[in-house]
Structure formats: structure tokens, C-alpha cells
Amino acid sequence: MPRTRPEPGSLPAVLGCLLQEKRLERGLSVPDLAALTGLSVGVIRRYEFGDRMPSWEAFITIARKLDMTPSQLMSYLDDFGLEKKPGRKRRAA
């Protein structure tokens, strides 16, 4: 059963929820995604629970196995309530 959405602002929790949603949309189980990516079932679960952040290489692999580019997958983060910190303002010259 899918977990409820995490509180806004926690990147690992938000990313985990997003990965789980995209995996389920494609009809994949955790063991299916693990087999496709070469990652362990436990690692996939830790990503989805927000207990661990994937390395960039793992993120790229997961995105591709979900038939997405890393950029497409990252673009969904806003939909999951990731809070953005205000950027630094440039000083006028």
C-alpha cells in the first residue's frame, strides 16, 4: 500500500515518495525494480522510505528503468511539495 505523502521539505522523503509512485504507475514491485536496476530490494526500500538518498548513478539508473530521464523525474519534485529555499540575491554592480 502506498505511503502517505511526507511533510514538505525533506528531500529524501519527497524523493522516496516520488520513486514509489512512479514505480507503481509502471506496475513494478520493489523486487522488479531491484532486478531491473541491479540494486538490492533493501536499497530500493530505503530510498522509498526516505531513509537513504540514491547516488547520482543510482538515480540515473532508476530513472531510465522507469522510462524517464533524470530531469523528468526531478521535475516532479515540485508536485510533491519540496520546499525551495530562497536563492542568494546578486548585488547590483
Image: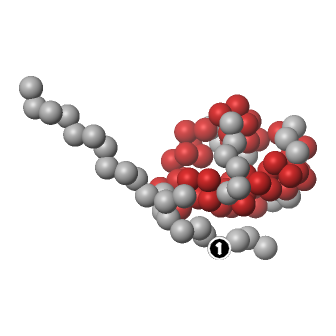
| Residue at position x 61%, y 38% in the image | 70
Sort mark 1 into few (<14), some (14-19) or many (20+) by Cα contacts within 10 Å. Answer: few
**Residue closest to the far top:** 93
Quadrant into which the N terminus falls: bottom right
In the image, is 25 to the left or to the right of 71? right
Quadrant into which the C terminus falls: top left
Residue 2 image position (x, y, % from top left): 73, 70
In the image, is 93 to the left or to the right of 51? left
| Residue at position x 65%, y 73% in the image | 4
Residue 64 shows in the view: no
For badge 1, the amino acid type reads Thr
Where 10 sits versus 67, above or below?
below
| Residue at position x 60%, y 69% in the image | 5
Residue 57 image position (x, y, % from top left): 70, 31
- Report the coloring of the rendering: secondary structure
Residue 30 shows in the view: yes
Residue 54 image position (x, y, % from top left): 69, 42
Q: Which residue is mark 1?
A: 4
